[in-house]
Image: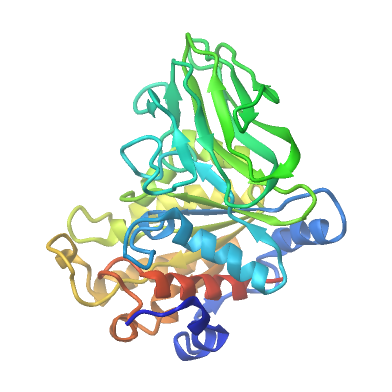
Amino acid sequence: MVYELSEIDDSIAVKSALGLPPVFVSPTVLLKWKKAIGRMQGGEAYRPQLAMIGDSKTAGVASSFTGQWRFASSVSVRLAQALTARGLPASSESMFGSSGTSVVPASEYDPCRSGFSGWSLAYGAGSDGGMAGELVTTTGTNPGTFTPSVPVDRVRVFFKQGEANATTASAAVSVDGGSSLGTLAGGSSPAYLRSSVINLGTLASHAISVTPAGGAPFYLAGMIAFNSTVPAVDVLNLGVSGVKAAYHATTPRLNWLGAAQPDLTIINLGSNDMLLTGATDVMTWSTSMQTIITKAKQTGDVVLVFPAIGRNPASSAQSVLVTDTIRAPFRAALMGLAVTNGCAFVDEQAALGGRDLAEARGFFADSLHENYAGTVVRSFGLAEMIMV
């Protein structure tokens, strides 16, 4: 069964598929988020930041009509659309890290990325991890380009200035092949996580390029492009395909999350931790989740998502999907973390109608990943929760 976006309306998302929304939201758990939205709606020059941390289900695996891995059809993009449709302007015009891909620029995943000839993923010592997979790096001078899908006049660039016992190169930011509009400063140790907002001059459909000076490594974490004349929430896709919770709980990656200073962080991790092959025990998983929650709560509020899975394995790798009995302790632990830390909670397994009904309704591309329709329904449920 294939759904058109227009066919998946609120009545399906909130009533038919969801039943009563299986959520926990007390009046006090989203106060920082509400304050951030109030600042924006009150006329301040403030753009609330909404970070989505997760694995392949966040990155966008299987979310397109063709079942392929596409940023443009991921839950972050759908959430921005759902919020905007409900009267809260939101944008998903950003790119971060490798998202779990093994190549640069990962244009098949995100066609807004181009160039990056001679760039590589910054694995290993000195890379400091990244916000959504590995940083991308080069010692050369070839540009990496990000072309947003809508007109923009500003870009916020996240990069690393300096590294242990070494100097990093500077880089110039330009648009449409023109001259430099601003410089991302290089430097020496210790390492600093930086972000700079560059004025692009005119509101237009720009191709935004970052061109390193060369001679030393330059590390790019990501970019957020936006229209400064339209107040909106920036929805950031920080999903990394194939990872467990411990991946996002490392200090370098958490430091980058701190640099983004999200007003709301939606965490959907556990699908890979619960797989029978290489499964993580509940206590270890809970410890990693608590580490991420603690960091995210320093700047904003948190929504914890219990991930859904389907019933029928679509491949030998997915034939080891866990039983409901094995999943139950993880759900209980996540609910406990929500109550203890004052987080909102949503059970997407129940939200999609349970494993059997979710597959019967055609919400899964395989037994692990929601398809286009399932992703849209997920975004509707999240939008309803966080509307203020």
33 on left or right of 351: right
* Residue 310 position in % (x across, y down): 28, 75
Left or right: residue 317 versus residue 110 is left
- Residue 89, picture quadrant: bottom right
Q: Report which quarter residue 302 is drawn in.
A: bottom right
Residue 21 in sight from this viewpoint: no
> Which one is nearer the viewer's eye here, 280 or 59?
59
Q: Position of residue 148 (x, y in %)?
A: 58, 47
Q: Identify which residue is drawn at 82% across, 56% down.
A: 39
Quadrant where the C terminus lies? bottom right
Q: Is residue 269 visible?
A: yes
Residue placed furthest toward the right: 43
Q: Residue at x 70, y 34 (%)?
A: 197
Q: Nearer the viewer, residue 251 or 313?
A: 313
Q: Residue at x 24, y 77 (%)?
A: 311
Locate the N terminus and report the quarter of the image it occupies: bottom left
Q: Residue at x 32, y 81 (%)?
A: 362
Q: Is residue 163 above or below residue 326?
A: above
Vertical placement of 180 versus 156: above or below? Answer: above
- Rendering coords of residue 318 (x, y %): 19, 64
- For this orientation, the residue located farthest to the front is 177
Q: Position of residue 67 (x, y in %)?
A: 31, 64
